[in-house]
Amino acid sequence: MKLKQLSVFLENKPGRLRELCALLAENQINIITLSLADTEQFGILRLIVKDYDKAKTLLESNGFVAKLTEVIAVELDDQPGGLSEILSIEEASGISVEYMYAFVIKSGEKAVLLFRFDDMDKAVAALQQANLPILDSVELYQRAEG
């Protein structure tokens, strides 16, 4: 139920993000979705890719600092109130969101929200109890590729 996410620390300088993206492209690694947060000196790029072990090894061998973490992908109808529903479920279970990001499935009818919670196992249990669809890596990649 949990997915592997690649977190990469980037120097905040022109061209560094493009270098990373070009390196992945040259090695046929497709980015499913990403999130970028930055400060004055560095950024954290969070990526979902199909072959995360290959991507991590490739990035590290080219001077990037990369780490694997777990996230949860929840699929819901792309309409108002979906995020609020998930947050209510987790709040009722005493779980906090550390960060999240989202993307829309190519059909435009579904959205996928990716979460990092402070208690991942408890978060999965709460979402399952609420009958919300949690995507595993195979389901996520299939939906993303259309």
Image: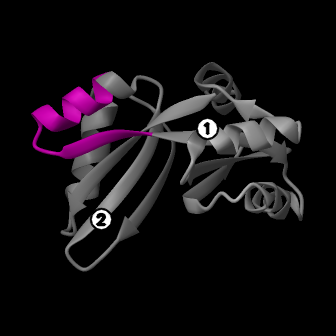
* Residue 135 painted magenta: no
* Residue 62 painted magenta: yes
Residue drawn at the location 59% of the way across and 56% of the way down: 101
* Picture coordinates of residue 137, whole percent (x, y): 59, 25
Q: Which residues are magenta?
A: 54-69
Q: Is residue 28 at all visible to an observer of this figure?
A: no
Contact (CB < 8 A) between labels 1 and 2?
Answer: no
Residue that lies at the very extreme toward the bottom in this rendered image: 40
The residue tagged 1 is 121
* Picture coordinates of residue 84, whole percent (x, y): 82, 64
Image height of 16 relative to 30, above or below: below
Judged from the image, the secondary structure of the residue bearing numbered disc 2 is strand
Q: Along the line of sight, which residue is nearer the eye, 4 or 17?
A: 4
Judged from the image, the secondary structure of the residue bearing numbered disc 1 is helix
Answer few, some or many: residues within 10 Å of disc 2's Cα (few below 14, many 20 plus, some between 14 and 19): some
Dot 2 amino acid type = Gly
Q: Along the line of sight, which residue is nearer the eye, 123 or 32?
A: 123
The residue tagged 2 is 43
* Position of residue 81 in the picture relative to residue 33 (left or right): right
Residue drawn at the location 38% of the way across and 28% of the way down: 52
Of the image marks 1 and 2, the number of the one nearer the N terminus: 2
Which quarter of the picture shows residue 38? bottom left
Residue drawn at the location 20% of the way across and 67% of the way down: 14
Image height of 100 relative to 106, above or below: below
Question: What is the quadrant of the N terminus in the image?
Answer: top right
* Picture coordinates of residue 83, whole percent (x, y): 78, 60
Q: Along the line of sight, which residue is nearer the eye, 47 or 133?
A: 133
* Position of residue 38 in the picture relative to residue 87 (left or right): left
Residue that lies at the very extreme toward the top in this rendered image: 138
Which quarter of the picture shows residue 96? bottom right
* Picture coordinates of residue 50, whole percent (x, y): 47, 25
Spatial CA distance of label 1 from label 2 is: 28 Å
